[in-house]
Amino acid sequence: MIEERISEMGIALPSAPAPPAGSYIPVARSGSLLYVSGQIPQKDGKIVFAGKVSDSNVTRAQESARLCAINILAQAKSHLGDLERVERIVSLTGFVNSVPEFTQHPKVINAASDLLVEIFGGERGSHSRMAVGASSLPLGVMTEIGAVIQAKG
């Protein structure tokens, strides 16, 4: 049902999520909680959204955040085998690679939050969140987002 909804939304999850780019694992499980490492806006191994976020490119930064959320789902599916096993999205931590005077970080990360609520519904998709600015992010990406997801069983 969840993956059908994703498909109906015109979203294709990566068949193979990005491997770790350092000394960490993409998903760590503790009890029913999955801690998904920060995901960046990459597709097919290539960075899609790079550069500094400013008031002039908020829409592009939102697309970057949305792609991060899609990559979070790909990691969760790879770990769980099926997104139906997602009990709820617990929390997101979003970083925005922004110019110093930028203050719309929540507006950027809303794109990821809104997508997850649209996919999982209000009860399963609503979550706590942080949205902060950063002076730089790995590989110069616009956004990086990590997640905590509660799994069934």
Image: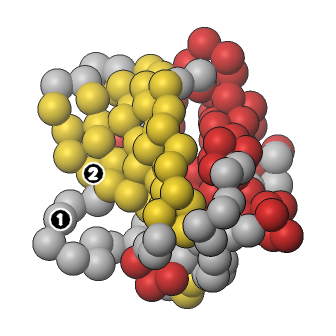
* Comparing labels 2 and 1, the label whose residue is closer to the camera: 1
**The disc labelled 2 sits on which kind of residue?**
Val
Q: Mark 1 points at which residue?
A: 24
Q: Is residue 68 above or below residue 142?
A: above
**The disc labelled 1 sits on which kind of residue?**
Tyr
Residue at screen point 44% across, 21% down: 87
| Image quarter of residue 22 | bottom left
Residue at screen point 45% across, 84% down: 139
The image's colouring method is secondary structure
Q: Which mark is residue 95?
A: none
Which x, y percent locates residue 28?
20, 46
Q: In which quarter of the image is the C terminus?
A: top left
Q: Mark 2 points at which residue?
A: 27
Considering depth in this image, is 19 or 79 the residue closer to the camera? 19
Residue 12 visible in the shown view: no
Secondary structure under badge 2? strand
Considering depth in this image, is 71 or 98 the residue closer to the camera? 98
Distance Cα–Cα, label 2 vs label 1: 9 Å
Name the side, left or right, on which 12 lies relative to 41.
right
Residue at screen point 35% across, 26% down: 151
Which x, y percent locates residue 148?
37, 35
Residue 80 visible in the shown view: yes
Q: In which quarter of the image is the N terminus?
A: top right
Residue that protrudes farthest toward the top in the picture? 123
| Image quarter of residue 80 | top left
| Image quarter of residue 29 | top left
Secondary structure under badge 1? loop
Tell me whether circle 2 and circle 1 mark residues in contact (CB < 8 Å): no
Q: Is residue 116 above or below residue 21?
A: above
